[in-house]
Amino acid sequence: MKYVFLICDDEKTSPSMEEIRADPAFQAYDAEVDRRGGTLGGARLRPVAAATTVRVREGETMVSDGPFAETKDFVGGIDIVECADLDDALALAALHPYASRGCIEVRPVWE
């Protein structure tokens, strides 16, 4: 079954791409994902300041800069993975380095 990991963190303390590549915890997570068959996709997102939110209410389109939610933790990236079941997906998400500094929201994908 496919799952999406919504990787959430406080972007004010988020590491650079170079720091992520050099971090042994990220290397171990990537190795485990590869051992399980690899990701089906994913991306790191630009900071919230680069976001634009679109809403349509009563036929009127409203566009605003920034995110919808006012919160400390923001979705900073996604991973799409194939796992046997929810327990397997939760175990993999627990290995993600951001699980110990932010959170990983795990959602099954409609297929």
Image: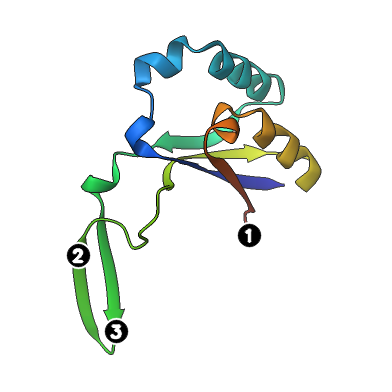
Residue 13, horizontal then vertical, whole percent: 37, 31
Q: Is residue 22 visible?
A: yes
How many angstroms separate mark 2 from mark 1 (CA)? 29 Å
Residue 87 occupies which quadrant of the picture?
Answer: top right
* Residue at 36% from the left image edge and 37% from the top image edge: 11
Q: Secondary structure at mark 3?
A: strand
Answer left or right for 35 relative to 102: right
- Vertical position of residue 40 compared to residue 49: above or below: above
Q: Nearer the viewer, residue 5 or 84?
A: 5
The amino acid beneath tag 2 is Ser
Q: Earlier in the sequence, mark 3 or mark 1?
A: 3
Characterize the local packing of mark 2: few (<14), some (14-19) or many (20 or more) Cα atoms within 10 angstroms: few
Q: Nearer the viewer, residue 93 or 99?
A: 99
- Vertical position of residue 2 compared to residue 32: above or below: below
Looking at the rendering, in which quadrant would you find the C terminus? bottom right
Residue 35, horizontal then vertical, whole percent: 70, 19
- Vertical position of residue 3 compared to residue 13: above or below: below
Which labelled disc corresponds to residue 57? 3
* Residue at 44% from the left image edge and 18% from the top image edge: 20
Residue 26, horizontal then vertical, whole percent: 54, 19
The amino acid beneath tag 3 is Arg
Q: What residue is disc 2 on?
A: 64
Characterize the local packing of mark 3: few (<14), some (14-19) or many (20 or more) Cα atoms within 10 angstroms: few
The amino acid beneath tag 1 is Trp
Camera-near label (2 vs 1) is 2
How many angstroms separate mark 3 from mark 2 (CA)? 13 Å
Q: Earlier in the sequence, mark 3 or mark 2?
A: 3
How many angstroms separate mark 3 from mark 1 (CA)? 26 Å
Q: What residue is disc 1 on?
A: 110
Q: Is residue 85 visible?
A: no
